[in-house]
Image (cartoon, helix red, strand yellow):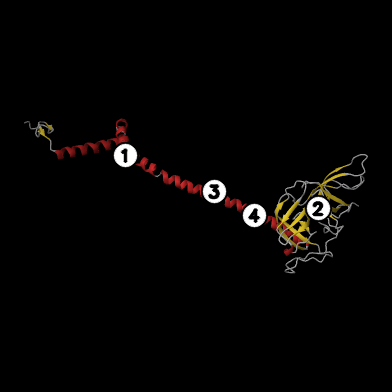
Amino acid sequence: MADFSDDDTPRFLGRRIAPGLKIVAITIVSIVLMMVDNAHDSLSTVRGVLAVALEPVQMAAEIPGDAADYLKNYFDRDDLVHENEQLSQKLLLLQSRLQKLAALKAENERIRALLASASAIDRNVLIARILSVSPDPYRQYVKLNKGSVDGVFVGQTLIDAHGIMGQVTDVTPLTSRAILISDPNTGIPVQVNRTGLQTIAQGTGHTGALTLPFLPNNADIEVGDLLISSGLGGRYPPNYPVARVTRVVHRPGEEFLDVTAEPTANLNHGREVLLVWNNHGDGAQPASDHPGQSGKPAAPDDGSANDAKAP
């Protein structure tokens, strides 16, 4: 049986080299090489070659760590998906709350404008909310959330922050119905604010237009003139904005002008309105002043929402 214990030991000048001496020699050579490389940078080529040669070894050494990271991300995927769903739900909830806040802000601004209008007119008023509008395109009606228990009465004027909207035609204990000035079956006595010329403004069935059919061809009226309520007939209180003239057409040979005006009130949008008590002789008071009473005044006995006649 062969014995390799003595033959495998390195020899130097015929003598065996002790293992400790080999370590010392390798250490000395390493120190010398580092000193030479630091002083002269002469081993950069060798260092580059060794780096390229050892690159596969380095990549192989990194494989276990990369595999562990991949497996960790794979098993964490369900948690990430669940977290993403929760964040999406929270985002949707916050967006819905933001939309609600925007709606509340707009409503608050409208109520502020109504209150400012109420303080400017110096009358007894009641804020009401529009519950619905008439589905009939030829009838311009709105339903309000105030009724006789709140002091609402037939013939009461309905306004917003910009002008007259209409008047109440039907009242129940909890709700009421009002006809708008744009209804084709109603009219309102008005006067031109610039000249004092009085006439009738009639509805056309469209919320953006009124017509003035009883103005003679030589009437002093211009585009841009403001029309205010004249108070004739007692249905509407005087000096409220009603409309602004948008078109004046002189037709040769015709007896009357073709005049169109746009209502100053927002008839087709907004949900808050004001119900006005006309204190000129009707004796009506808000329900808050007389609890349990309707406050209904003696309305004109003509049975129509429009008692205005052409001059």
Disc 3 marks a residue whose amino acid type is: Leu
Q: Residue 12, labelled with which disc?
A: none
- Observer-nearest residue: 7 or 205? 205
Residue 36 coordinates in the image, percent (x, y): 27, 35
Q: Residue furthest left?
A: 1
Q: Quadrant of residue 77?
A: top left
- Label 2, residues with CA under 10 Å away: few <14, some 14-19, many ≥20: many
Mark pair 2, 3: CA separation: 43 Å
Q: Are marks 2 and 1 in contact (CB under 8 Å)?
A: no
Disc 2 marks a residue whose amino acid type is: Val
Residue under pointer 1: 64
Q: Are marks 4 and 2 in contact (CB under 8 Å)?
A: no
Of badges 4 and 3, the one in the foreground is 3
- Label 3, residues with CA under 10 Å away: few <14, some 14-19, many ≥20: few
Q: As displayed, is residue 290 above or below residue 198?
A: below
- Observer-nearest residue: 66 or 252? 252
Which circle's residue, 2 or 3, is located before the other in the chain? Answer: 3
